[in-house]
Amino acid sequence: MTAPEEGDAAMGASLQPRGGGPGRRRRQPMSEINVTPMVDVMLVLLVIFMVTAPLLVTGVDVELPRASSPSLDQDNTALTVTVQGDGRVFLNQTEVTLDALAARMDAITGANPEARVYVRGDEGVAYGRVMAAMGSLYDAGYRRVALITRPPSGAGDTGAAQ
């Protein structure tokens, strides 16, 4: 077998001794950060949160009436009083009686009459039952009360304060 000439490829074998001879530098650690795995993890988390966020929205199921008036800005810190079709009253997701509604409101808001309250009444419930709930709130001193309805059929089916 003959030694490879200058023009021939060495076939991946190195004839130089290992461990850095004269003129060879020691290997330096790579100073760049590889962010690809971090981006992959963040994208997976984003997808998980996008899928699960709509599932976390809970509430009392009620059939809201439709209204043609424009929507008001919604306040995420507001309390919701719901009157279901069978006449039961809920404060957020907890069932209460009309007599206990004012006391529960005071306990939650710290007797703050400036708290925003949304009233949701089922389309099939008697008008007087919704007005009794609103009257109980009014008697307790809550004046910032808004009724929630569904937008007209062309604007979607999400509930909006009217």
Image (cartoon, helix red, strand yellow):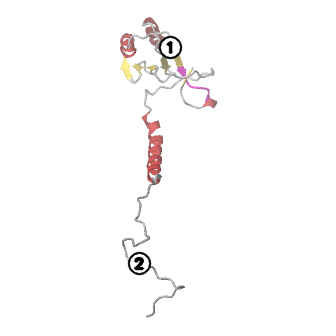
- Given the image, on which type of amino acid does mark 2 rest? Gln
Estimate the x, y position of residue 19 in percent, counting from the top left.
36, 71
The crowding category of the residue bearing disc 1, from other C-alpha atoms within 10 Å (few below 14, some 14 to 19, many at least 20), is some
The crowding category of the residue bearing disc 2, from other C-alpha atoms within 10 Å (few below 14, some 14 to 19, many at least 20), is few
Residue at 49%, 18% in the rendered image: 118
The residue range painted magenta reads 148-153
- Kindly identify which numbered label has been placed on residue 16: 2
Residues 21 and 8: in front is: 21
Estimate the x, y position of residue 29 in percent, counting from the top left.
41, 59
- Kindly identify which numbered label has been placed on residue 145: 1
Judge left or right: residue 161 versus residue 17.
right
Residue at 56%, 31% in the rendered image: 157
Instruction: Tell me if residue 150 can be seen.
Output: yes
**Quadrant of the drawing holding the N terminus:** bottom left
Q: CA distance from mark 2 to mark 1?
A: 85 Å
User: Secondary structure beneath disc 1?
Assistant: strand
Residue at 44%, 70% in the rendered image: 23
Residues 132 and 50: in front is: 50
Q: Residue furthest bottom?
A: 1
Find out whether the residues at labels 2 and 1 contact each other: C-beta distance under 8 Å: no
Estimate the x, y position of residue 161 in percent, counting from the top left.
55, 21
Residues 97 and 34: in front is: 34
